[in-house]
Image: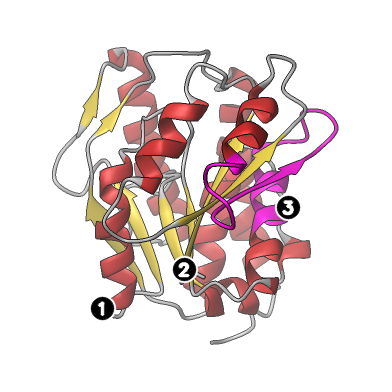
Amino acid sequence: MSDSIVIIPTYNELENIENIIRAVFSQSHPFDLLIIDDGSPDGTANVVKKLQGEFTDRLFIIERKGKLGLGTAYICGFKWAIEKKYEYIFEMDADFSHNPNDLIKLHDACKDGADVAIGSRYITGVNVVNWPIGRVLMSYFASKYVRYVTGLQIADTTAGFKCYRRKVLETINLDKIHFKGYAFQIEMKFTAFKCGFTLKEVPIIFINRELGVSKMNGGIFSEAVLGVLKLKWWSLFKKYPQK
């Protein structure tokens, strides 16, 4: 068994799923892969199950009934990965906005001492391709806002391409993570930080999806803006487990 598992939540990713699976398995490091599919009506799960015959004991799928949210998908995957004793546990999108070739860089950052490695769009400027300028500015200044409110010393606080060492996810009470959408990414970083873990940013280039439909919407962004204030307020009264 590999020491590393890549978790990819999916909803209607038929156009991307086979290519992203093959790209992960083409890496020089032997990553395993767990797909969390939320009942995609386009048949995404069927493609995964077909490929399981080719990638025996490396490709896994959990099928959920309905669109239950990004955060709950990752929590489901984290618990599965902890139970299977993977040491390095990754979050990654299915649409190639996160380059599978960067998995090695995140893995090496954790292997070299980081507890959480973050694929960062903003640590060396603004490394985003094919996003409308409005969305670039929204994302960039959202990260600035999160830093200001929370005190997190992270340039890309909303990043969703990450590697955790297992001990981080074992320490965090995953059942107490509140948010399901965009704010989930912020809450996980903030909680790891408050628990005393080391967060390291690794520069990546984020490329907007070419195939399929983005799941981002105004409601998800609003959750993040208000959620940050809630996180800061809760933290004033909460005792965080320490590593």
User: Does the magenta segment cover residue 165?
Assistant: no
In this view, the mark in front (3 or 2): 2
Report whether 189 appears left or right of 35: left
Nearer-N-terminus badge (2/1): 2
Q: Are marks 2 and 1 in contact (CB under 8 Å)?
A: no
* Position in image of residue 103 (x %, y %): 32, 53
- Name the kind of residue labelled 2 in the image: Ser
Q: Neighbour class for label 1 at 10 Å: few (<14), some, many (≥20)? A: few
Q: Residue at x 31, y 12 (%)?
A: 132
Residue 48 is drawn in which quadrant? Answer: top right
Residue 138: mark in rendering: none
Circle 1: residue type: Asp
- Pick the residue in front: 40 or 150: 40
Residue 47: where, in percent of width, then height? 61, 27
* Element on which disc 2 rests: loop
Whole-number angstrom distance, CA of label 3 to CA of label 2: 30 Å
- The magenta stretch is 52-77
Q: Write down the residue under mark 3.
A: 178
Secondary structure found at label 1 = loop
Residue 21 lies left or right of residue 56; in this view the side is: left
**Residue underneath mark 1:** 112
* Dot 3 alpha-carbon crowd within 10 angstroms: few under 14, some 14 to 19, many 20 or more: some
* Residue under label 2: 2
Q: Which residue shows up at 67% across the image and 36% down it?
A: 49
